[in-house]
Image (cartoon, rainbow, N blue to C red):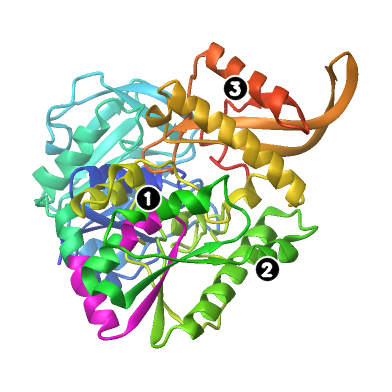
Amino acid sequence: MHELVLILDFGSQYTQLIARRIREEQVYCRIERSDLSATEIKHMGAKALILSGGPNSIFEAQAPQVDPAIFDLEIPILGVCYGLQIMAQHFKGNVIPGETREYGPMGISFPTPSPLFEGVSEGSQVWMSHGDHVESIPENFNIIAHSSGDLIAGISNQSKAFYGVQFHPEVNHTVQGQTIISNFLFKIADFNRDWTSSSFVEDAIKEIQATVGEGKVLLGLSGGVDSSVLAFLMHEAIGDNCVPVFINNGLLRNHETEEVKSLFQTSHVKIYQHDYTDAFLSELEGVTEPEKKRKIIGRVFIEAFEEVAREIEGIDFLAQGTLYPDIIESGAITGHAVTIKSHHNVGGLPEKMSLKVIEPFKELFKDEVRAVGRVLNVPAKIIGRHPFPGPGLAVRCLGAVSEDRLRILRAADQIFIDTLYETGWYDKIWQAFTVLLPIQTVGVMGDKRTYENVLAIRAVHSLDGMTADWVRIPYEIIADISSKIVNSVSGVNRVVYDVTSKPPGTIEWE
């Protein structure tokens, strides 16, 4: 069993980044709701706790709290922003509403040495985001950092291994944030680096074998990185008792079925293909609301898999490539998370299903799945594929989905991706795609007035999909892509480039 850090989530937009930074240090962590009881935490075997930031003021009537008994568990605790204020308030320190809000980059200084800031430079830049702040510290605590705004930026009770910071060490804007997180994990909480891709594969294989026994598993294969790597993992664990099924939902890119087939042809994993285009498109007809689209697609996928399962003797389980960000964004972990969007394999599952669900990757981030793929010798071409959403082109076809609009989207998307390959940009980008907007604009083509569709192109850099930045593709390449699309895709007369990062935007438009 891996050593565990539990992150109690108070609703910060950065909570998942704390998890990412911890995983980068090869330490296992999980995000849990903030009101988890001390008994539950002890039962989980947590070796340390991190109390996240959050949007609330601790003076609000409904402000989230912790079980006070967590401070009696005798394990190290790090409070971040709101988490620091919770800790200070519990131990009778004085937290006051801020007259001046500190937001953005600040320098910090260290009035006294602390293992939390070992190796951090005096005046190092950190990222502040708070209104309330600690005015006076609790008894038996020390001030270990001040902000350049002369507020308390760090406190500690070193004998109990309780630490708090009034800034976000997890964000890139905190220049030496990773050093601070590393210090907490290794100098204070005494963790070992036991969370590796190889150890995950070993543990997952044992767990799959124990869960499935002699049973058979239907695997929902999309051809994307997650489900493809899962196919290799399941085959390693139970061999041909895993049946990978590729469902054509009619929402795929050009030649997707043939490409997926060719990707697996040279491997030992045999896949089965079924066409359910009519079922999906008829259910989606006239539907424009994004959440409704996702839930319909989730339901029809399950109905299709259950129908296929009835044709194969002995299928009891359904395996899916659900990832941790899918669960986080679906609001399925904590009481404070807002549902950003339902993922078809999280929010779209019906309550009554004849198949039991197995999700070996549900606590992994995308880059961790790719690392698992390398351990399993998954072909590089599969590992290197850009992410493709489970609901497919339905969430890139804004407004109603129709055969004609899908035709436009497929043709434009192929031009975009082919050009990225030709110019050497595909492998420099985490995800690239086109979006068909429910907007028409006036144009001039061949001396005639046109009134046709607007198409957006999107390309982002990311590590795990939780945050992303738009890619600065050279203008001449964007110009070439735009020209090719407008000239060869009937129905498009305008191309725009999306220059929004995540946050505030999501990567997909729906």
Asked if residue 220 is among those painted magenta in the image, a careful observer would answer yes
Work out how far the residue at label 1 is from the one at label 2, CA to CA, in angstroms.
Answer: 26 Å
From the image, tell me which residue sits under label 1: 263
Disc 2 crowd, CA 10 A, few/some/many (<14, 14-19, 20+): some
Whether residue 156 is visible, yes or no, is yes
Percent position of residue 1, x then y: 15, 67
Residue situated in front as seen by the camera: 145 or 260: 260
- Whether residue 186 sits left or right of residue 41 in the image: it is left
From the image, tell me which residue sits under label 3: 481
- Asked if marks 2 and 3 touch (Cβ < 8 Å), the reply is no
From the image, tell me which residue sits under label 2: 279
Q: What amino acid is found at the position of numbered circle 2 in the picture?
A: Ala
Question: What SS does tag 2 mark?
Answer: helix
- Whether residue 473 sits left or right of residue 493 in the image: it is left
Image disc number at residue 453: none
Percent position of residue 318, x then y: 42, 75
Question: What SS does tag 3 mark?
Answer: helix
